[in-house]
């Protein structure tokens, strides 16, 4: 059992050493937001270019070339200076929007079924009836879910005066890079 723990510990640190090496990234800095959004090699980015002002591109970053200020993708590369807009996504808003829409549809469906199958219980109670309150609750939930999915799911940032995109390389230099070759 002790040998398994040793093997797992050594494997963990070897994997950690490989992950820590990749420290090139670009970050989106926004005013008033102390936490910058970082895009690493292998992460996806949605952006607009100067040459195509009406179209967003959504691609996976394969390599970040700090020296030439390039982002390399499977099908080519772009200069960071050509990016005019960045789009960030909020997955929680999309998920919550779908949940609210589902709740509203189920609310209206169950209200309609209860109205169809409701019976008079003999005591003057008419059972459950579909009314304006049922329609308003279900309709409001559906509308709120749709608004969240369409308008709150994504946010576009125009680069320039307030938002900026910066390329950073924080890899640790080797001893030969610091002190020169051994000799």
Image: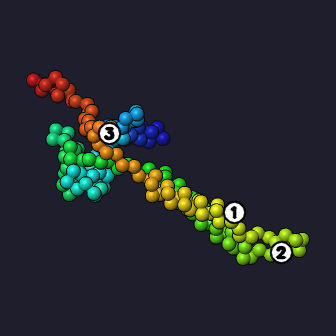
Disc 3 crowd rating (10 Å Cα; few below 14, some 14-19, many 20+) is some
> Disc 3 marks which residue?
163
Residue 72 spot, x, y in % from top left:
21, 49
Seen in the picture, residue 42 relative to 110 is either above or below; the reply is above
Give the number of callouts: 3
Residue 120 image label: 2
CA separation, marks 1 and 3? 45 Å
In the displayed structure image, the side of residue 123 where residue 118 appears, left or right: left
Disc 2 crowd rating (10 Å Cα; few below 14, some 14-19, many 20+) is few
Front-most of residues 117 and 24: 117
Seen in the picture, residue 58 relative to 81 is either above or below; the reply is below
Q: Are marks 2 and 3 in contact (CB under 8 Å)?
A: no
Disc 1 crowd rating (10 Å Cα; few below 14, some 14-19, many 20+) is few
Which secondary structure, mark 3?
Answer: loop
Residue for point 77% across, 74% down: 118
- Whether residue 18 is visible to the viewer of this picture, yes or no, is no
Which secondary structure, mark 2?
Answer: loop
Q: Are marks 1 and 3 in contact (CB under 8 Å)?
A: no
CA separation, marks 2 and 3? 64 Å
Residue for point 19% across, 49% down: 78
Front-most of residues 71 and 175: 71
- Whether residue 5 is visible to the viewer of this picture, yes or no, is yes
In the displayed structure image, the side of residue 13 where residue 170 appears, left or right: left
Residue 140 spot, x, y in % from top left:
59, 60
Residue extending farthest to the left is 183
């Amino acid at each position: 059992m002790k040998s398994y723990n040793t093997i797992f510990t050594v494997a963990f640190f070897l994997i950690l050493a490989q992950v820590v090496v990749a420290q090139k990234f670009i970050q989106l800095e926004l005013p008033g937001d102390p936490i910058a959004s970082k895009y690493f090699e292998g992460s996806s980015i949605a952006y607009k270019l100067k040459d195509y002002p009406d179209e967003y591109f959504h691609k996976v970053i394969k390599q970040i070339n700090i020296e030439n200020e390039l982002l390399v993708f499977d099908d080519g590369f772009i200069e960071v200076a050509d990016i005019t807009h960045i789009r960030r996504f909020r997955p929680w808003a999309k998920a919550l929007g779908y949940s609210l829409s589902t709740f509203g549809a189920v609310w209206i469906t169950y209200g309609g079924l209860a109205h169809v199958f409701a019976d008079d219980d003999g005591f003057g109670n008419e059972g459950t009836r579909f009314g304006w309150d049922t329609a308003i609750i279900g309709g409001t939930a559906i509308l709120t879910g749709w608004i969240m999915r369409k308008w709150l799911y994504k946010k576009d940032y125009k680069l320039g005066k307030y938002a900026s995109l910066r390329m950073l390389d924080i890899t640790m230099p080797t001893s030969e890079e610091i002190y020169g070759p051994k000799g």
